[in-house]
Structure formats: structure tokens, C-alpha cells
Amino acid sequence: DSSTACMNDDDGDNYGDTTAPSGGTAGTDCDDTLSAVKPGATETCSTTYDDDCDSSANDVGATGCTTYYYDGDNDSYGKSTLSQCTCTTSGSYDVTTSTDCDDADSDTFPGAASSDSSTACMNDDDGDNYGDTTAPSGGTAGTDCDDTLSAVKPGATETCSTAYDDDCDGSANDTGATGCTTYYYDGDNDGYGLSSSSQCTCSASGSYDVTTSTDCDDAAATTYPTAADTFATNDGVDNDCDGYIDETGVAYGDLVITEFFGGNATATYDWVEFYNNSGDTISLANWTLTFCQDDSTTESAPYTGACASEVVVTFPSSATLADNAYYVVCGSTSASVWTTPADCDLLITSYDSPSYTSSTDIENAVGGFTLDIDGTTIDEVFYWQDSGQDDWPAYSPVATSYSSVQLDLDTINATSPDPADTNDDYSTSTTAPFSQDIWCLSDGAGVTTDWAASFSMYGTPGAINVVCP
């Protein structure tokens, strides 16, 4: 301090105590009890005092100091351009990492969007660990397409209850989103779609715009459930997709069984004729005609129609029957028994179930026919012979001639359908006659047409019936 002044130097460091002795002079040693403390000494962070007596303990730049960076947004990451080396943190110089790319935003720092990157400096305002797709200055863009909503991020569940892109895949309300509706492809715009082509979306899209999948022909706008499928349409198409064709509006009396022949041991074949009384051409597709067969020889009137077996015949899909026209279905163990195929509209040598044989035809004493559409019986006729008889009635003048049974023409032409009561029945019995016969043997009504190949067969198959006597 001075080579001549009278000072106190207790620690022997050649610097006088800052407190002057009586009659003496004050020196510059701020702590005269420690020889290491004196002006010009090295300031070090390992002590808590003012090593160099500059009035500041642990100065900036002291030996052993730590570089702290300015963290203005308190996100624990500082600016690389603002730092100081101090023994302890000081104010906002309180972090040792200098990689913050935006020190004015506490949501922007390295690893802020840890699901995108644990090191890249990104902005994550909504705290969902995905960075904003707009990169901060000096930072990196993340994958969060809406950084204001924490529910919106890659991998989130896409839901129809929101209008935005929940999962950030570039498409709002994706196919298959939670809460989606299954829409079916409706190519013909009839309000019904195809069950084989659908997508689950939040709203209708293009031709995927209906929620009903029961259209059976998506190329025809007139074909769909609830469409009209009547005799009047007569297009041979299942317009209402119920598996039946042109059946809607059918009523009792529209098709009437008008004539039949049951055969016998000599004539091992059967045929039945029915008449279109509907006022329109009828498509016969999906109609069925059931042959009833029963070997019983003990039946007595009235017959209940409890068949021992049934043979079910279906019609070709192209089969139609014009109004006021007849249709003849023929069964045979051999097609050669017919004079000409023109006698039959449908010639069957083997039925659908069971196979047609001489044992399953209706040549015996009991039998009948039933016409059905869409599971509903429209007309049926049964016949039987009393007292154990088991043969078709022969035309009496000629032992090998036979006659069909036909419905009275006046009854067919009646304004009301054939009533279902005992007066409809036909009987050749002299002991059990009916009061009014509307069925009769063809030969008994004066029919002389013989149309069988190998024997005499009288009837009017496919032609107008006669008036019964």
C-alpha cells in the first residue's frame, strides 16, 4: 500500500487493513485476517468472500465460474448470444443450455414436441408433444396440423363429431372415422344401394349416399324394394327385390285351374291347364304348381287335401301367359306319348322334387293341383274316387278312351271368382250327386277332340273350355 505510511497489516500480505490504526493510515486490504484476500488477488468461486477486494464477491468471470445463458421466457433454454460466466445464477441468466430458437415463447424450445423429436427446437402451443407445422425462426417444423387444440395431432382418433382433421393425415372426417355412417353405393339413384359396395363416412359422398342396402339391381332405377311389381308392369323383372316376379296385386281368381287329366295304368302321364283371368299378361317366373299324389283308395268326400307326396314344378323365368289365355303343364314318363309338343306349354319329364316316375305321378285315385305365388295359394283343385276305385274314368263307349275333367265355361266367365263351397264339386256318383255341378267330363260335354298319340284322349288342353251340361 505504502512504503512510508503507518498502517496495520495483521495477515502479513503487505496490504494494510482498511481500518486505520490510531494516528495511522487506512490501507486497501478488505479482510486483514486472510492473507489470500487483498487487492489484485484472483477472484474465485470456491470462496464466498471478495478475494480481490473490489467490493464484489464472486465477480463475473471469477475462476471456476459457470457460463449461464439468458432465459427470457423461463423455458429452461437460453439464447446463445446472451451469456455470462458467474459463480451462481443471476436473474434471467439462469440456464446452462443455449439452444432456444425463440426466447420470447415459453412453448418453443428443443424437445418441446418430444413426440416429433427429443432434440429439435419446435413450437408446441397446445402441449400435446407435437410441434406446430409452421417452424419457429431458427427452428424446425413439427407435424401438428392445429397447434391450438391438444386433441388434434398425428395418431389421434378421427371422429365425425368434429369438423377438423383430428389425426393430421391431411383429410378431415376420414372414411372409418368414429361415429361414421355406413353409406351404400346407389348407382341408379333409386334410394337403395348395393350391400356389396359400401363405405363408412361422416357424410354422404358421391354415389355412396344411401343407408339402405337392399337393391337387387343397382343399374335399374325402377328396381328396388317397395317398387311396383305387378301384373300391369309385366316386365319379367323382380322390381321389388323380394325374389318374386310381377306378383304384387295378384288376387284370387286371377289364375284359375280349368282342366286336368290324372292318367291311369295305361296312360302314365298327367296334365293340368290354367287360365289367365287377371286382365293383364302375367309373368309366370317364380310361380309354382304343386302336383298332389296319394295312393289311398279309402278316401270319401270331402277330401282334405292331405297329400302323401307332392311334386313341385317351377316355371321358366321367361314364361308368360296373356290375358284370356290358357297354359298347359304336362308330365310324362316319356315325351313320346304326346301327339305334338304344341299340346303342352311346359313338358316335364322329371320334376324338381321328387323325380317324376310312374309311382309319383297323379294317376291314382286321389290327387290335385295347387297354384302359388309368393307363398300364397291362388287356386287349388283336388279329386278323389270313392269306394276303393283306383283308376281314371274311361270314356264309356270306348274302353281305351279317356276324358279330362274341365271347369264349366260359364263359371270361368263369371264376374265373381269361383266360390269355394261344395256346390263347386263335380260328381259322377248316382248315390252321392251334388246339387250343382260346375265341373264335368269333357266327353260328357260333347268334346270330340282326340289329342293323345297312342290312345283316345278327349279334352281341350290350351283351348277354350265348354259349358257343362
Image (cartoon, rainbow, N blue to C red):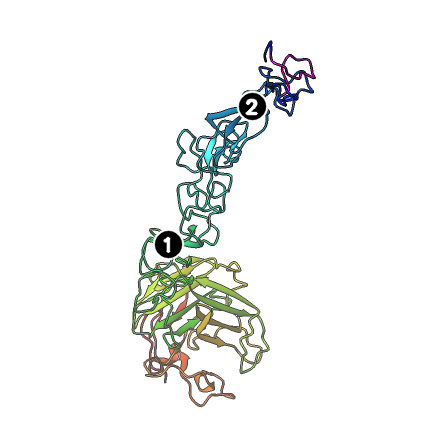
User: Residue placed farthest to the front in the image?
Assistant: 23
Contact, mark 2 vs mark 1 (Cβ under 8 Å): no
Question: Which numbered mark, 2 or 1, is in the foreground of this view?
Answer: 2
Tell me the quadrant of the picture where the C terminus can be found: bottom left
**Which numbered marker is on residue 59?**
2
- Residue 194 image offset from top left, x and y in percent: 40, 54
Instruction: Give the residues drawn in magenta, as a range.
Output: 5-17
Instruction: Name the residue type under label 2.
Output: Asp
Disc 2 to disc 1, C-alpha distance? 73 Å
Residue 223 vs 140, above or below: the answer is below
Q: Residue at x 42, y 88 (%)?
A: 436
Q: Is 11 within the magenta?
A: yes
**Which numbered marker is on residue 204?**
1
Sequence-wise, which precedes: disc 2 or disc 1? 2
- Residue 86 image offset from top left, x and y in percent: 56, 24
Q: Residue at x 43, y 38 (%)?
A: 132
